Amino acid sequence: MRRTTKSGLLPEVLGERNFRRYYIGQSLSQFGDALLPIAMAFAVLDVLGSASALGLVLAAGFVPQVILTLFGGVVADRVNRRRLMIACDVLRMGSQALQGTLLLTGHTNLITMVVLHGLWGVGAAFFKPSATGLVAELVDAGKLQQANGLTGLSSNIAFTLGPALGGVLIVAISPGAAILIDAATFAASAIALSLIRLPATAARTGSRPTILADLAGGWQEFRSRTWLWALVVWAAGFHLLALPAYQILGPVTAKAELGGVSAWATIGVGTGLGLVLGGVLTLRLKPRFILRSSFIPLGLYGLPLLLLAFPHALPGGTVTIAIAALLGNVGVSLFNVMFGTAIQQHVPLEAISRVSAYDWMGSLALLPVGQAIIGPAAGLTSTRVMLTVGGLYMLLSIPVLYLVRSARDLPNVLYQVPNATEATPTHGDVTRKHGDNPAAPDHEADSALQAGGQAPA
């Protein structure tokens, strides 16, 4: 059942009952997710007192995602995504409930922490690609940007406030209590998903021949869209060079030259506010070209990196860097929503989860590599050099993205579907192929970068 919202204060997509239930469940779940990093860190350190043990536990949660996300995309495109997501929530609810209980009762150890956090990672590997496809099933194409903007905004708010709230819980009770709250939010998400009612036409029986054939089909969908793989290649560079520099060398610079924890906390406030402001903007902006609108704001992420490299180059010091972090993270927030919306608008519904999995793998696979090498690289050169490299990558790569014609000119369906934001689709529209848009750029024609005809290696 769908209804429209009359108030201009609320995004119209919230008038759709199925999406509203999904959004409430995910907002609660994201709050729990935001508690987890600080809770797990102090749980391991309190019980085992070892940085090596902490690294092992965190890796146990990340490795299953690296190994299983592609498989998760295949499964999500074969089965009912909603039911698969409920199963993932139940798995993570159980693992977190047991993890928190063992911590509170003092019966945990390294093995149980690794195994239970690994189960959490398995659930995440299947949930992420499923969620991308489910949103495309729940919301008509003209409202996808609004839907993604809302979920992104909730996530940004959660991860801005979550660490502080998690710290309060840890101090007042224990890390186990925060993890139990995370388990409860997975239960809330599962209940919300169970209340979603999709028409029978949205269910897929999935009679594909083999998993390898499905992977190959997903790869073909991915590689045939230059805008898609070009931006994933760019994102891989971001996670190799820019983000690790900010995450690791930023605090180092704050401690050495800006006064320590208080300076980095101030910059962190700027980061959080930027992410939230970017989320708000995605609810209001209606760009004609869905990706182009985020390119310049995204490049501004280079500003805080360059200012950290030269912290006294401009007056204001920490405050100036915090403002730059705000501007840069507005761009990151905009890009995340616009890119996710582009995938949902321009990739066939039956392939979205696999394509999303390839996106996740390609974009994030180099992040642990970057985190591992940024410190040694700064030791061989200097902190200033590596921050500058990250900053210049952001500023100089953005003009290159404009040269990718299919990315620059990828249309927003708001300007192709008459009254897209007011339309009330029939049940048959739920199973439409978002990617079958006759006005979308031809996939074969744009098989290389337009400037020079060279595809990136």
Image: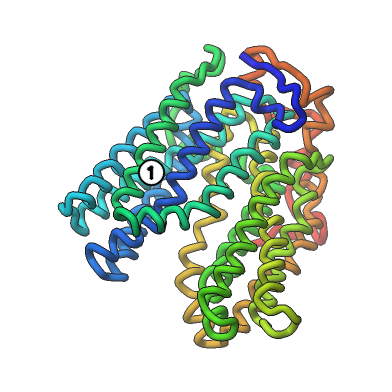
User: In the image, is 327 to the left or to the right of 248?
Assistant: right
Question: Residue visible at 55% across and 68% down?
Answer: 265
Q: Which quadrant of the structure image shows residue 443? A: top right
Horizontal side of 99 relative to 237 (left or right) equals: left
- The image shows residue 150 at horizontal and vertical percentages of 63, 38
In screen coordinates, is 88 left or right of 357? left
Q: Position of residue 57 (x, y in %)?
A: 31, 59
Q: Amino acid at mark 1?
A: Asp
| In this picture, residue 299 sits left or right of residue 219 | right
- Disc 1 marks which residue? 182
Q: Is residue 331 above or below residue 80?
A: below
- Judge by depth and name the residue closer to the eye, 258 or 355: 258
Nearest to the observer: residue 314 or residue 213: 314
> Which residue appears farthest toward the left when viewing the image?
107
- Pointer 1: residues within 10 angstroms few (<14), some, or many (20+)? many
Q: Secondary structure at mark 1?
A: helix
The reply to whether residue 345 is in sight is yes
Residue at point 52%, 53% (across, down)? 161
Q: Residue 79: tell me if it is visible.
A: no
96 and 133: which one is in front? Answer: 96
Residue that lies at the very extreme toward the front in this rendered image: 172
Q: Quadrant of the N terminus?
A: top right
- Residue that appears at 31% across and 70% down: 51
Residue at 77%, 43% in the rendered image: 290
Q: Is residue 16 above or below residue 65?
A: above
